[in-house]
Image (cartoon, rainbow, N blue to C red):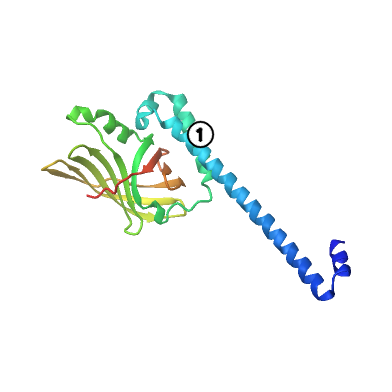
Amino acid sequence: MATSRCFLLLPISLSLPNCNANSSKRQRRVHNHASRITCSSTTNQSQSAKQELLNLMADQDRGLKTQKDPNKRSSIIKAIDDMAVLGSDMVTTGDSLSATWRLLWTTEKEQLFIIEKAYLFGTQTGDVLQVIDVEKKVLNNVITFPPDGVFFVRSNIEIASPQRVNFRFTSAVLRGKNWEVPLPPFGKGWFETVYLDDEIRVVKDIRGDYLVVERAPYQWTE
């Protein structure tokens, strides 16, 4: 009805173009506004869920304390699952995966054992890192022992899906200030980055372990 009245009141040469143009503009404005609302809502949800996860992990000493607190573990894993839902449509195996990632929290027993027991070897654990280069198809898992010690495991990687990366260990090295001990490679598997942004990355792996890392403010190299 509105279109008919517009056609009757205006010259023929102007009526249809103006009505359609105005209608199209209104539709575009509504669509753009709705898109902004949806994007803003999703962003707000992600930020809220991420902050909840970070708050839960903040006092957990990279996961050491969580081992003795099943309720806290359950809460953190639920928060991780919430992040995975928000990241379900993300492609997390592109160039943005390449970085030096620093450990915030994990359930991986081997890493936690080394972090906890490093004092037995007269040292303490520094940063625990994952160093990924998607283009070169390499991954280094790194545990540092300041000021000069480091243990790292080299791996080759292969992108398997929008969120999954397959890996195969190729070698390992325990290195001090003036010495180095090579170790044989061991194992293969996969991990899925279920959430990724400019600050953090949330991971599940083949063994059912969880990993939350942040982008380190430096680039680790051998």
Q: Is residue 2 left or right of residue 63?
A: right
Residue tagged by mark 1? Answer: 78
| Residue 213: x %, y % from top left | 38, 41
Q: Is residue 200 above or below residue 62?
A: below
Q: Quadrant of the N terminus?
A: bottom right
Viewer-closest of 173 and 54:
54
Q: Is residue 131 left or right of residue 151?
A: right
Mark 1 closeness class: few <14, some 14–19, many ≥20 residues within 10 Å: few
| Residue 204: x %, y % from top left | 43, 42
Type of residue at label 1? Lys
Q: Is residue 180 left or right of residue 131?
A: left
Q: Residue at x 62, y 53 (%)?
A: 35
Residue lying furthest front: 10
Q: Residue at x 25, y 47 (%)?
A: 185
| Residue 222: x %, y % from top left | 22, 49
Residue lying furthest left: 178
Q: Is residue 165 left or right of residue 122?
A: right
Q: In this figure, what is the number of numbered marks? A: 1
Label 1 SS: helix
Q: Is residue 91 above or below residue 200?
A: below
Residue lying furthest bottom: 13
| Residue 199: x %, y % from top left | 41, 44
